[in-house]
Image: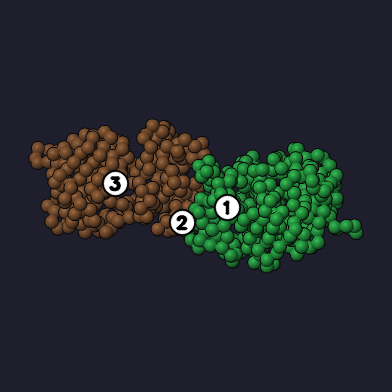
Chain colours: A green, B brown
Amino acid sequence: MGAGRKPRVGIIGTGAIGGFYGVMLARAGFDVHFLLRSEYPAVLEHGLQVNSSQHGKLTLKPAQAYANAEQMPPCDWLLVGAKTTSNLDLAPAIIQAAATDAKVLVLQNGLDVEDDLRAVLPDSLHLLGGLCFICVHRAGPGQIEHQALGAVNLGYHSGPASADATLSQAIVEEGAALFREAGLDSQAMGNLQQARWQKLVWNVPYNGLSVLLRASTTPLMADPASRELIQDLMQEVLQGAAACGHVIPAAYAQQLFKSTEHMPDYWPSMYHDFLHQRPLELAAIYAAPLAAARAAGCELPKIQALYQALSFIDRHHA
Amino acid sequence: MGAGRKPRVGIIGTGAIGGFYGVMLARAGFDVHFLLRSEYPAVLEHGLQVNSSQHGKLTLKPAQAYANAEQMPPCDWLLVGAKTTSNLDLAPAIIQAAATDAKVLVLQNGLDVEDDLRAVLPDSLHLLGGLCFICVHRAGPGQIEHQALGAVNLGYHSGPASADATLSQAIVEEGAALFREAGLDSQAMGNLQQARWQKLVWNVPYNGLSVLLRASTTPLMADPASRELIQDLMQEVLQGAAACGHVIPAAYAQQLFKSTEHMPDYWPSMYHDFLHQRPLELAAIYAAPLAAARAAGCELPKIQALYQALSFIDRHHA
């Protein structure tokens, strides 16, 4: 963190993820600024509320809320918690709110989610990826329901420190320290792609099956057929990762499977997108890993079947 | 058909399939007797109606309807059109209504659907399997909606002619002639297992996807993702069939795919079962082919994923 002032944090896209982490950081004393769109009037009036099973009812009022990035002060860290499907739309706001050598942290699941953004960001900005292990959803304008967990694993994607492993690692550690100061688990990951594949071990089965079977984690973990399908899908993620050079131990998947059994009942974010007729994040969570595995000579038939079925649903549920 | 009287036909389980073929045979002058359960009073009062796009409105009134097999005369041919899930329950009625050397024809999709029945039928009865290429569904008690097609392909399963290829072939030809006299296409198949695998090329993709994606054939054939998934599933059926010694040319699958494009919009029977919260025919259409292929060393991952998802739905839709 260095000796100076605490870094200033900007939240770009204050949904469930951005709102939760922003409130937790503000509570820890960071200077946090929230960019909003449709929810701006509600948050200006009522602030932000996090109803957390672990941390109780947290209210940030007033929240430093903005409808326009031009009014935000230059931020040292920018947390992007919006849907992967809107990254390009957010680029102008990110550039506007960024301090000269700011760190842009994309808190999103899936593979290659930083690529679109990197292509349009100035070279002076650091781009990082973050994987959130959290059960959280938006309950209303400025209202966030936090059910469980909260850890964030970070890795360096690209930017001025790309060629300097020591510097990039220091930046990632600085980001992890930010979350730890807010009372959250956070690990600096040496390899962002490896971290993204690891996260897919959970997202590929649970996100897709919640939509396909209209089922939350408890019934999915209670039925022998869906349990078997979840394990088969996890196994294919491990095969895809290995083909791409990222060896994930089988015990990691077993551990995720078991810990999901002990989680409170949870509807993955893709189900909320389905329910509210928003586009599903299929490119990041399915198409990109399938393409990466295929380029490495590895077919993942069950994931592909799930992706094909979800693609149909994505075009017909609206 | 021989020189004697026309054979007497019994319909065991007068749903859409049994009702349609029974009415068509009665219309052609056969002596047809219908066993019913819950629909008995309605059929006794109003007879049977087939509303057919090809044959017009057909009414059979009175229909020779029975609530109890003990009251049926001995039948030369027994057509079983019920769900595969109820074959064992129907065995006593079949035995009751059968003439001494009767032919029992199971008009059902899937693999191994005759096995349960064979185990409880007397050795003197011939058992045959029939595949119906037809779009038909039950519209109400004794009311059948016939949308398109109607061909039946038959093969000998087991019985007194098992060791006599000439005799078994003659019996199959006799069955095919029955349907042809009623104005329907019908082929005698030398190999019933081959015929069942061929039929699965259609049933595996369309039955399951209609339930999984809540979609009829027209939208399934209009979306690029479902088209690809259908073709992949057909391809796996061909692989499974080949592993079991039944080579089906790729052109056969392409032809089925194309002809489905030109069919009127159709909800497969499994969707009707789903809609009315009846058990899905997963054992015959998915579990048995998967097990047969696996026993031959062949994995069918997309079919398996579809089966796993449908198994979950089957246990949760009621």
Circle 3 chain: B
Q: Splitting the image into 4 quarters, where does residue A61 fall?
A: bottom right
Q: Splitting the image into 4 quarters, where does residue B193 fall?
A: top left
Circle 1 chain: A
Co-location on one chain, circles 2 and 3: yes
User: Which residue corresponds to mark 1?
Assistant: A272
Find residue B61 and report its horizontal and vertical position in percent.
15, 44
Going by the numbered disc 2, the residue's amino acid type is Phe
At x 17%, y 43%, the residue is B60
For mark 1, does the 10 Å Cα neighbourhood hold few (<14), some (14 to 19), or many (20 or more) residues? some
Q: Splitting the image into 4 quarters, where does residue B85 fall?
A: bottom left
Alpha-carbon span between mark 2 and mark 3: 26 Å
For mark 3, does the 10 Å Cα neighbourhood hold few (<14), some (14 to 19), or many (20 or more) residues? some
Q: In this rendering, is residue A84 above or below B37?
A: above
Going by the numbered disc 1, the residue's amino acid type is His
Circle 2 chain: B
User: Which residue corresponds to mark 2?
Assistant: B312
Q: Is residue B232 visible?
A: no
Q: In this rendering, is residue B189 above or below A8?
A: above
Co-location on one chain, circles 1 and 2: no
